[in-house]
Structures are given as structure tokens and as C-alpha cells.
Amino acid sequence: TNKQTNKQTNKQTNKQTNKSSLRLSYLYSLILLSFNPFLFSQAVAETLPTVVSKIGLGTLKSDNTWWSAVRALSSDGTIAGGKAHSDNNREVATIWSGKNWQNKTNLGTLKSDNTGVSEILALSSDGTIAGGMADNDNDDSKAAFWKIKYPEKKVIPATKIEDIAKKTVPAAKIQDIAKPITKPVVIAKIDVKNTQLSMARLGNDALDVVSLQTQSLQRLQQNRYVEKGKVGYLVRQDVAKQKGDTTASVGLGLSYGFGNGITAGINLDKSLSRQLPKSYKTDGNTGVGIFANWKGENWFVETTAAWQKDKVKVERPLLANTEAGSNKTTMKGSAVSLTAGYDFGKVSVYSSLRHSQVSRDAYVEKNAEFAASFAKLSYKDTALTLGVETKLPLTEQLNLLASAEVEQQLNNDAPTYAVSMPAVGSFSKTAKISKTRGRVQAGLSYNFNPKFSVTFTPYYEHTTFGYNGWGTSLQLKGVF
């Protein structure tokens, strides 16, 4: 009985002792963690930690007084980030680095005069990217990233160390071997929200340019008929506008009549000017289209194909505290169509099966510390079209031209704009495609003689990407 009583008493005593030790350990840890701005190197024995050393990191004030706090460490603990009071009595984002964290670097804010309040809340594993909050010119506290460059440590080669050990080296030579290390510098700082907004706007611009490319492919698929042994030519000038973006182009078409109602030809298209979104600048482009047609007494069949390639420079929309990252990339497009119809004389009806695809190559920005990587952008569309055309004579030489068509999507691979950026994250947007689109146009044709005519045709359309666009086409046609 005495043994059992002693065992129970010992167990209870041990439990109480352990609980007391744990409470004391927990309380002691809380006390240690409240000692900001000190860094601790701790050794743990059983449940009670022991402070081996503590180092005061100081502040940014010239007399090293007032308050500071460490919020984050690099993976090896050699770089600390947080905030510290400066001489203007503001708490600003601060990096402590170097031997015993002696180098103190003021990272500043997002204000144009670098005043205000900021703070580091996180560091990358190597300490080169700091994340936190900073005031902007509107005195709003915004999420911010800083990119920091640290001085490279001067490594003395082993051979030179041996030389130093063997003989006396002049002081000047020693300074040349191991130059003093300077402080780290801030090479970039960005407003996270504005950077994300810039990426979103660039995505909208990219989808707008894809829509303009589809219009260019449509122009390259024009066709005509000429008699056997005759050569036809067409010179045109087109203007297309949608959402404030404008393309002005010139084109040349040549065709030849092979007889039995067969005509084949080629179209060339060159942009004179392109009022693209500000983020896109073209280096010039040329498109090529071919066609082959057959026309009987009333029935007709038309086939077309077109290709276009465009070199563009893409630059991020520049917002406050963002970088103007840019690079060149390539946009490509192709299209094919098959049309069958019936000519009633003054009125023709037709149906077309059309397929088009446009892509923009993937690329990585230059001229930016937080460089964005853009995934390939691709778009494919297959549609069925029903249309009607009419040509009504007003005088012996003047004719009224009018047409209307409705296009219904059969299959579609909508383009997705996707971008990723170090520290900032990823962004993607998939375009909304209109399943039903349409186009109407009306104009005049004037025949100077049987071999030469001029036409002018304005048009209005609802595009694949849901935009309402308009344009004009001026054409000179002839046969020889």
C-alpha cells in the first residue's frame, strides 16, 4: 500500500513539475519574442531555451535611437527585413545585412519624393525580393515589392592567400585584392495592385489585336471573276476601326481567267498605319491570299486561303510605380473558306464554311526587374455563313451595291491570355466569343468603261469578339 501511494504521489508530482516547466518555457519564449529589435541565436536544452547572444540592430536615425522591428529573415538568416525609424521620425522599410547585420538600407516608399511610411513583411529565401506595404502619392498604404541588389563578396584566390602568407604585400595591393563591400541598393520597387492592373489592361489589348488580325484575313479572301484569257487587277485602300483601334491598309489583287468559268488569283495586303492599342507597335506586316472560283450559268463555287505574319513590339501600360517591361514577338494568322451560291441575276445568295486561326508567340519581357512571362496566345474559329448580295443599276454607269450576312459559330477555341511574374503571381483571361455575328454593307460602283470601274463601300459589323466595328473600302478594278 505504501509503495502504491508513493508511486501515485511521484506521478502527480512529476506531472505538476512537467506542466510547470512547460508553462515556464512558454512564458519565457513570449518574453524573448517581445525583445524587438533583437535577433536571437537560441540553443535549446530540454524545454528551457537559453539566449546565447543578442544583437541590437539599431534604427535609421543618425543617433541610432528610437524604435525598429524585424519582420522577416532570409533562409540563412544573414539578411533581416522589417521597419525602423528614420531621421524624419517615420517608420520605413529597412534591410539589415552584412556582418552582424551592420548594413542598414532604407528601401523607401512608393511616393515620388520617397517620403511616408513603409514596412517589410516578408523576404524571399535569398533576400533579393522584399514584400510589404508602402505609402503612395495619395497617402494610401499599398502592397509593394522591392528588388534589392547586394554587393558581391570579394573572394581572394587561394594562390594569392599563399602569396600573402609567404611575403609582405603592399597595402595598395591588399586593397586591390579585397575591396571594401558597399551597401545593398534598391534597383526596383513596384506597386503590386497597379502592376496587376497593368497586366490586365495588356491582356485586353492583346485580345483586341487578335480581333484586328481576323479582319486583315477577311480582306485577303476577296475574289472576282474574269473571262477566259483575261487578266484582272484590283487596287484597294481599306480602313477598319473597332474600339478606337484603327487599321489603314492597301492591297493589290491579280486574277486570270482559265476558261470554263474558272478564275484564280492572288491578293496582297500591306498595312500603311495601325492605330493599335498603345501597348502594341507593329514593325510592318504583309499578308497573302489566294483564291480559285468556278461559275456556271447560275451556280458558283469559291475557295480562298490567306496567311499573315506581323512583328510587334509589346510594352506594358505604364501606371504609377510599375515597370515598362517590353519585348518583340510575332503574330501569325491563317484562314480558309469554301463558298457555294446561286446567282438569280440582280440578287445572289450564298453559304460559306470558314475557318480561321490567329496566334501570338510566347515571350519574356526585357527592361524589367520583375520581368513577366507571357504564354502563347492562340485562337481558332470555325463558322457557317449565310449571305445575300445585290447589284441594282441606277444609271447606265452607276450601280448600287448592297450585301448582308450572318455567321454562326460551329466550333471555337477561345484565346486565353496568361502571364506570370516573380513574386506578383499569375493572371489569365479568356476572351468571350460571340457565337452569332453579322455584317452589312452598301455602296456605289461606277463603270468608266467595260474594262475599268471604281467602287466605294462602307460597312458595319458585329465581330467575333463582340465588338461593333465599321470600315470603308475603296477599290479600282480593271481588266486587260
Image (cartoon, helix red, strand yellow):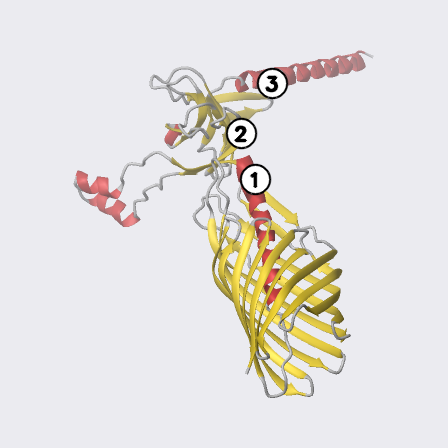
Kindly report the distance in space between the C-alpha atoms of the residues bearing marks 3 and 2.
Answer: 38 Å
Lower sequence index among marks 1 and 3: 3
Is 297 rendered above or below residue 71? below
Q: Nearer the viewer, mark 2 or mark 1?
A: 1
Q: Residues within 10 Å of mark 3 (few under 14, many from 20)?
A: some
Residue 41 in view, yes or no: no
Q: Label 3 sits on what residue type?
A: Ser
Q: Quadrant of the C terminus?
A: bottom right
Distance from label 2 to label 1 (Cα)? 13 Å
Residue 9: which quarter of the image? top right
Which residue position holds label 1? 197
Front-lying residue, 7 or 410? 410
x, y (%) of residue 350? 75, 70
Q: Nearer the viewer, mark 1 or mark 3?
A: 1
- On screen, 259 above or below 145? below
Q: Which numbered marker is on residue 25? A: 3
Label 2 crowd (10 A; few <14 / some 14-19 / many >=20): some
**Mark 1 residue element:** helix
**Gap between marks 1 and 3, in whole Å?**
48 Å
Front in this rendered view, residue 54 or 134: 134
Asked if marks 3 and 2 touch (Cβ < 8 Å), the reply is no
Question: On the image, which quarter does residue 439 sit in?
Answer: bottom right
Residue found at x 75% / y 70%:
347
For the point 30% across and 45% down, the residue is 156
Please state the horizontal and vertical placement of residue 337, each as a whole percent of the image: 69, 70
Mark positioned earlier in the residue sequence (2 or 1): 2
What is the quadrant of the N terminus in the image? Answer: top right
368 is higher (above) or lower (below) than 98: below
Q: Which residue is label 2 attached to?
A: 142
Local SS, label 3: helix
The crowding category of the residue bearing disc 1, from other C-alpha atoms within 10 Å (few below 14, some 14 to 19, many at least 20), is some
